[in-house]
Image (tube, helix red, strand yellow):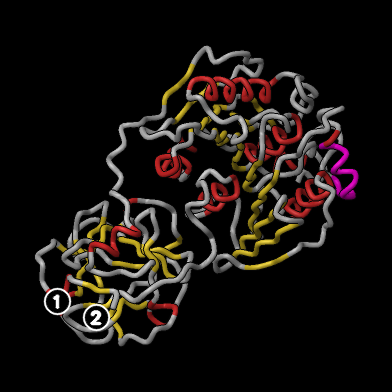
Amino acid sequence: MQRSELRTRRGALAALITVAVTVLSMFLTAAPQASAAVLTEVTGFGNNPGNLRMYLYAPDRLASRPGVLVAMHGCNGWAQGFHQGTEFASLADRYGFVVIYPQANKSANGLSNCFDVWSNEALRHGGGSDPVSIVSMVSYALQRYNGDPQKVFATGFSSGAMETLNLLATYPDVFKAGAPFAGVPYGCLGPAGCGDKSPQQWGDLARNAYPGYTGPRPRVMAWHGTADDVLPYTMLQEEIDQWTNVHGLSQTPASTDSPQSGWTRRVFGSGQVESYTINGAGHNLPHPGMAAYAIRFFGLDDGSSTPTPTPGAPIRGVASGRCVDVPGAATADGTAVQLWDCNGQPNQQWAATPAGELRVYGNKCLDAAGTGNGTRIQIYACHGGANQQWRLNADGTITGVQSGLCLDAVGQATANGTRIQLYTCHGGANQRWTGR
């Protein structure tokens, strides 16, 4: 969405790391195999009044009854680009769910490829247009892959975020939760407009999208950047007002925290509604690592990962006796790690996860900035990439899943401040590590 859209609508606005095989087997899984899965266009998927195109990603290893996630691009966007530019497909590889990427085709205020969130047809259950087409895609995927209808979710950016909330309002019987990134409340671009409304008024709009529906309402995780110059940050609070009212919750959060630096999370009720304020972010969500939080919120990770810190242990160099350390206890993405005297502090505590990650602070991963000899090893927000997955080997070496190279103390040095890198495995003491 662009400013022009807003002008037309008045305000539219680890476990321990050790060389012992018995300990490793408790925490490590086999390295993921190279995936042959590709994004595929599906035709003839069912009723398609919106004349949308359907693209589908089904990982090689599906869950026995996989969930289905609808992931939607913004105006001027493309399904293929949203597939390639977000982490939902890599998370599907890990957890075995199906991702649908609809291709929008509507024009609005000089923009192309927008989802319909303004027509009378789109704003009501069974009315037609894009929502009916998307529900047909979901039905196809559930049938084709023996999917679980209790695990159907929606997410998207900008126009796709708007359609996310549109689907939750018009088809609460289909979608169990949604995660809009930089959107507006349901009905905002319809006749009711985006002007300031009370929570009750916003809630009534959403409830009236499906008159007579009395079943459970979808949960909502809404994200917005404070520096969004296309859709104002104030829209986040309007979304929260709407969906807390839909759920009959207080607009006062039950808890507030900061899962990562620059993020503020507010939780309402017992978790039916969450909001994420991203300090300084513009109209460019989701950033790396955010998709994983949405997948946890949906339950598509089956509880196998957690956003809260987990106990860790040091990674101690055999040659140096010193520990892999985040300098100055920094938390910024891209901070290079080093050797330093072991001190038991959180910046030296690394937790091995079942996904093959080595986490520090609970939410930052040991990350390879490339794949060649000499590549810097750093911390970065966990996003599920192969450059953040590691094999802990029985000989004490640690190899990168993506590169096949070993974690190495540069120049076989042992002093405080020695940089850690990737290097061809040779079995030297500067490439062997222990959790003791």
The x and y percentages for residue 182 are: 65, 48
Is residue 419 something that shows in the picture? Answer: yes
Q: Is mark 2 on a helix, strand or loop?
A: loop
- Sequence-earlier tag: 1 or 2: 1
Residues under labels 1 and 2: Cα distance? 9 Å
Q: In this picture, is 278 found above or below 206? A: below
Q: Where is residue 32 in the image (x, y as percent from the top left)?
A: 30, 45
Residue shown at the point (35%, 78%) measured from the top left: 325
Whether the residues at callouts 1 and 2 have beta carbons within 8 Å, the answer is: yes
Q: Residue furthest front?
A: 22
Quadrant of the drawing holding the N terminus? top right
**Residue 8 lies in what quarter of the image?**
top right
Question: As rendered, which of 306 and 233 lies closer to the eye?
Answer: 306
423 vs 227, nearest the viewer: 423
Q: Mark 1 points at which residue?
A: 411
Q: Is residue 284 visible?
A: no
Per the image, is 207 magenta?
A: no
For disc 2, the marked residue is 418
Asked if 68 appears above or below 435 in the picture, the reply is above
Q: Quadrant of the C terminus?
A: bottom left
Q: Is residue 304 toward the left or the right of residue 315 in the image?
A: right
Q: Give the secondary structure at mark 1.
A: helix
Residue range highlighted in magenta: 195-206
User: Main SS type for the magenta part?
Assistant: helix
Q: In this view, does 129 lie to the left or right of 297?
A: right
Crowding near the residue tagged with mark 2, few <14, some 14–19, many ≥20 C-alpha atoms within 10 Å: some
Q: Where is residue 297 in the image (x, y as percent from the top left)?
A: 60, 49
Task: Look at 66% across and 53% down and name the residue there.
Answer: 229
Name the residue: 44% across, 31% down. Answer: 57
- The type of residue carrying mark 1 is Gly
